[in-house]
Image: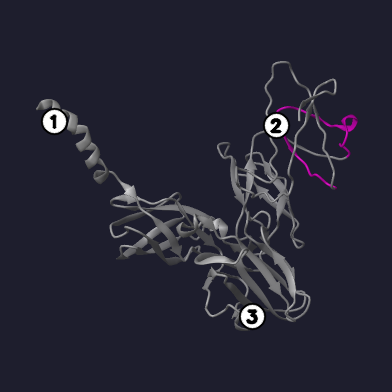
């Protein structure tokens, strides 16, 4: 009898264990998916098994929950208090219930006044009137196009950036596909002025800077690039005169160093003085472009490294003109014009292990944040000119 009881005991424990363990709590989306810093925003959390809601777990101190109300098993209304100095961009969070925890989702913090899409706006004729210096929260439905009308004077600057795929919102009913948005701008005569999709450094999100050719009402169109919206594709459309460069140089500096950063890809941007925190433990920081009182809605990763920096000088396209490097070091350079190659020379010792890495498109895997279009390649040649690495 004892033998039978002991043999059944593991099965009993296994059967009881799932009831005592925490379980996964599905969290589908946040509505709205972001808010303005320095404000309190009502955010509805939508998911499953939320009736025993316990808390929202943030990964920084920029946002806190000022209060909440459980509406039903699938919805919780929270009041997000956003710090006035909160970092612009997306902030990760999870929802914890008394019986489980959700996957990680993102909440975006902006610097502009928040407004909301108003239907119907699916035709140019019914385009929703908007103005500058706003962040508009909208949704793209199936085969939906959202139109927004804005009045511009001749020569007036218009900056637009859309957060869609960077919000990280997936859809279970279409195998976790992500919203892949595009932007179009139509002039007062109805003709297409520009098209934006997958703008560096916004991954697969679009953005643009435009100067009005004539005075009149312009129309901004937002849609999924494949017109495959499923009704829940939330986006944040930033509209203003803010800077929207595509990349910059140098890409990094040493702790405590002050450097002049040159912004590229925005015709109205030039140099900006940047002082790096004197903290050797930091590997990077968020860098935002300034234009007067306006800030870029999202930032760039700026590398912080202790190596001395060597700035490329031309000509250095061939071995005889290769400048010497003192290893270890960081090299800041530009591949320009097309077909350019930069060659550097260094002294090596037998048995040394050297690591070479180029930061251009990416800072971290799957992040195209620097904005460079360079698809880099490295070749290392020995003292006799033989190729060692290619």
Magenta region's main secondary structure? Answer: loop
Q: Is residue 271 above or below residue 226?
A: above
Which element type, helix, strand or loop, lies under badge 1? helix
Q: Is residue 170 above or below residue 5?
A: below
Q: Residue furthest left?
A: 1
Residue 272 x, y percent position in the rendering: 71, 54
Which element type, helix, strand or loop, lies under badge 2? loop
Position of 28 compared to 143: left or right? left
Say which residue appears at 68% left-offset and 67% top-offset: 159
Residue position for label 3 = 124
Which element type, helix, strand or loop, lies under badge 3? helix
Q: Are marks 1 and 3 in contact (CB under 8 Å)?
A: no
Residue 265 x, y percent position in the rendering: 75, 57
Say which quarter of the image contains residue 266: bottom right
Mark closest to the chain's N terminus, 1 or 3? 1
Mark closest to the chain's N terminus, 2 or 1? 1
Magenta highlight on residue 292: no
Residue position for label 1 = 5
Say which quarter of the image contains residue 215: bottom right
Q: Nearer the viewer, residue 258 or 195?
A: 195
Q: Are marks 3 and 2 in contact (CB under 8 Å)?
A: no
Say which residue appears at 34% left-offset and 55% top-offset: 55
Position of 78 compared to 196: left or right? left
Magenta region:
315-337
Say which quarter of the image contains residue 331: top right
Residue 62 x, y percent position in the rendering: 47, 55
Quadrant including the C terminus: top right
Label 1 CA crowd tier, 10 Å (few <14, some 14–19, many 20+): few
Distance between mark 1 and mark 3 Cα atoms: 74 Å
Distance between mark 2 and mark 1 Cα atoms: 62 Å
Residue position for label 2 = 356
């Amino acid at each position: 009898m004892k033998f039978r009881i002991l043999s059944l005991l593991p099965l009993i424990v296994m059967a009881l264990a799932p009831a005592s363990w925490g379980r996964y709590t599905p969290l589908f989306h946040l509505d709205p998916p972001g808010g303005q810093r320095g404000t309190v925003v009502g955010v509805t959390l939508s998911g499953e098994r939320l009736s025993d809601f316990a808390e929202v777990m943030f990964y920084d101190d920029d946002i806190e929950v000022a209060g909440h109300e459980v509406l039903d098993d699938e919805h919780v209304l929270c009041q997000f208090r956003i710090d006035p100095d909160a970092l612009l961009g997306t902030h990760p969070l999870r929802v914890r219930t008394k019986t489980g925890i959700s996957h990680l989702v993102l909440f975006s913090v902006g610097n502009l006044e928040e407004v909301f899409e108003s239907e119907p706006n699916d035709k140019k004729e019914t385009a929703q009137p908007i103005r500058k210096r706003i962040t508009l929260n909208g949704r793209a439905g199936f085969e939906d196009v959202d139109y927004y009308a804005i009045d511009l004077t001749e020569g007036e600057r218009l900056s637009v950036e859309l957060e869609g795929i960077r919000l990280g919102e997936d859809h279970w009913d279409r195998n976790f596909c992500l919203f892949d948005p595009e932007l179009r701008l139509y002039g007062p005569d109805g003709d297409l002025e520009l098209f934006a999709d997958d703008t560096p450094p916004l991954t697969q999100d679009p953005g643009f800077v435009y100067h009005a050719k004539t005075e009149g009402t312009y129309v901004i169109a937002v849609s999924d690039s494949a017109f495959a919206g499923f009704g829940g594709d939330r986006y944040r459309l930033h509209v203003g005169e803010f800077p929207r460069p595509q990349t910059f140089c140098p890409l990094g500096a040493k702790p405590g160093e002050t450097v002049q950063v040159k912004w590229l890809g925005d015709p109205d941007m030039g140099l900006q003085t940047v002082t790096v925190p004197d903290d050797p433990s930091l590997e990077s920081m968020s860098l935002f472009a300034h234009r007067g009182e306006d800030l870029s809605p999202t930032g760039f990763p700026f590398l912080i490294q202790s190596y001395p920096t060597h700035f490329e000088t031309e000509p250095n396209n061939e071995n005889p003109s290769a400048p010497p490097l003192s290893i270890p070091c960081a090299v800041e350079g530009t591949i320009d014009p097309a077909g350019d190659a930069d060659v550097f020379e260094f002294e090596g010792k037998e048995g040394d292990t050297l690591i070479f890495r180029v930061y251009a498109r990416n800072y971290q895997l799957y992040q195209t944040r620097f904005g460079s279009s360079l698809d880099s390649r490295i070749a290392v040649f020995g003292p006799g000119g033989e190729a060692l690495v290619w």
